[in-house]
Amino acid sequence: MTISMYEASVGLFVPNLRNLSVLLDKGVAYAEARKFNPAVLLGMRLAPNMYDLAQQIGEACRHATVAPALLAQQEPVALPVLEHDMAGLQARIATSIEFIESLPRAAIDAAAEQNVFFKLKNGTELPFTGRTLLLTFSVPQFFFHVTTAYDLLRHAGVELVKKDYLGRK
């Protein structure tokens, strides 16, 4: 069985970003039902040295946009400065989805053996082929941050179950 680079990137990131958006909506509804500011959820973290919920979402969006852009040999979308507000995070998710859906499928599909360099926040560039970027770095990073966002919301008491994470009705 063959899976295309496009399916392994855009086809994977888009539905899971949509699920992440729904998780945030459930967090907002939870906070409003309990009469507290939903922004409180965005500062939550599982450990003192971990990213908070807002940063987890920011990193999920970063990996979902940078990897397909590198594969398509295009500049990633410039996401705004990360704000700790629900509307800003929802806008970031929507911008990420719109951007990666706009990338050319043929270019991404042709990128499996292409040399790419992922630039870390500190400026270090990590070398990959398109395939290894997806399979060993960007997809695992993306799911780490999406899963941690889910876990933070669940830990806060938001009533979520696995089908919420998976996006199944």
Image (tube, grey):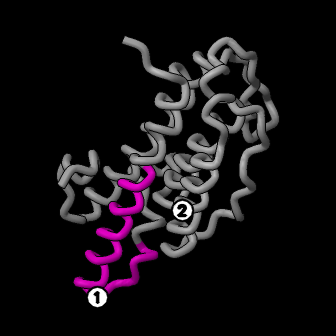
Picture disc at residue 67: none
Q: Residues within 10 Å of mark 1 (few under 14, many from 20)?
A: few
Which quarter of the figure is the C terminus placed in?
bottom left
Which quarter of the figure is the N terminus placed in?
top left
**Residue 50: x and y, percent?**
50, 47
* Residue 9 magenta: no
Amino acid tagged 2: Ala
The residue sitting at 38% across, 65% down in the picture is 24
- Please say if 142 is above or below 52: above
Left or right: 92 with respect to 23?
right
The residue sitting at 76% across, 25% down in the picture is 117
The residue sitting at 40% across, 83% down in the picture is 37
In terms of image quadrants, where is residue 69? top right
Label 2: which secondary element = helix
Q: What secondary structure do most residues of the magenta stretch adopt?
A: helix
**Residue 98: x and y, percent?**
59, 56
Q: Which residue is mark 1?
A: 35
Amino acid tagged 1: Lys
Left or right: 154 with respect to 77?
left
The residue sitting at 18% across, 63% down in the picture is 159
- Please say if 105 is above or below 20: above
In terms of image quadrants, where is residue 34? bottom left
- Give the foreground label among 2 and 1: 2
Q: Residues within 10 Å of mark 2 (few under 14, many from 20)?
A: some
**Residue 64: x and y, percent?**
56, 42
* Residue 18 magenta: yes
Tag 1 or tag 2, which sits nearer the N-term?
1
* Stretch in magenta: 17-40
Label 1: which secondary element = loop
Picture disc at residue 94: 2
Q: Nearer the viewer, residue 116 or 4?
A: 4
